[in-house]
Image (cartoon, helix red, strand yellow):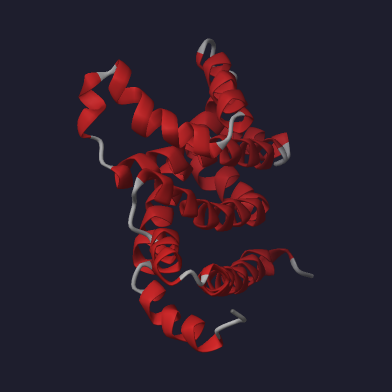
Amino acid sequence: MGFDFTYMIELLPILFKYLGTTMEMALWGLLFSLALALVLANLRVFKVPVFDQLSQLYISFFRGTPLLVQLFLLYYGLPQVFPIFVGLDAFSAAVIGLTLHFAAYMAESIRAAIIGIDRSQMEASLSIGMTTSQAMRRIILPQATRVALPSLMNYFIDMIKSTSLAFTLGVAEIMAKAQMEASSSFKFFEAFLAVALIYWGVVVILTRVQIWAEEKLNKAYVR
């Protein structure tokens, strides 16, 4: 049949309409996963009894199993065991799955960034009357943010790409629309290449944002 360039170009505006759903999933996932990752990282840094072990177990499970399996467990498995989840819609299940999965990875990046800050920073903060939480909020975490930013941005980029798995749950996002268009036209290469180009474009933009943010945060450290 050959490559239909015109079809691919005409398909791009159609797919762009569904990019909002993809980005909405990723942004909610980023917000919730960062919040959860901060809690997990602090539990591990301060070695809170019992909770430290539970957080290690959580991180081990969600890093050690595929995201697709986790999404299926959430959307198809939980309602079978806990009837309260019967009303869970596909979009929410996808956001929860992304949150739980990427929080495990982000927690380890944040933990590594925190313990990478010299202990003297915390000791100096405590010596001038700050509480541990004040020292973390005002001194340690701002410095750890600069260290963790590259890996966290990489996880966010990976999260955006991973939203493509949400179509397996029935979420009408960019990948699902491309699948429907390809099935009706039998032009699979053009449809999926169009999706790849859109994802690529989004990643290029985010990479530029990452570079700008790193330069901004590193400005005070440049001599």
Vertical side of 112 occupied by 149: above or below:
below
The residue lying toward the viewer, choosing from 190 and 150, is 190
| Residue 128 visible in the snapshot | no
Residue in the picture at 20% in, 33% down? 87
Image position, residue 82 (x, y; %): 27, 18
Image position, residue 97 (x, y; %): 43, 38
| Residue 117 visible in the snapshot | yes
**Quarter location, residue 99:** top left
Is 105 on the left or on the right of 10, as rendered? Answer: right
The residue lying toward the viewer, choosing from 50 and 17, is 17
Q: Residue furthest front?
A: 1
Image position, residue 155 (x, y; %): 59, 51
Q: Quadrant of the C terminus?
A: bottom right
**Quarter location, residue 105:** top right
Vertical side of 12 occupied by 82: above or below:
above
Q: Residue furthest bottom?
A: 6
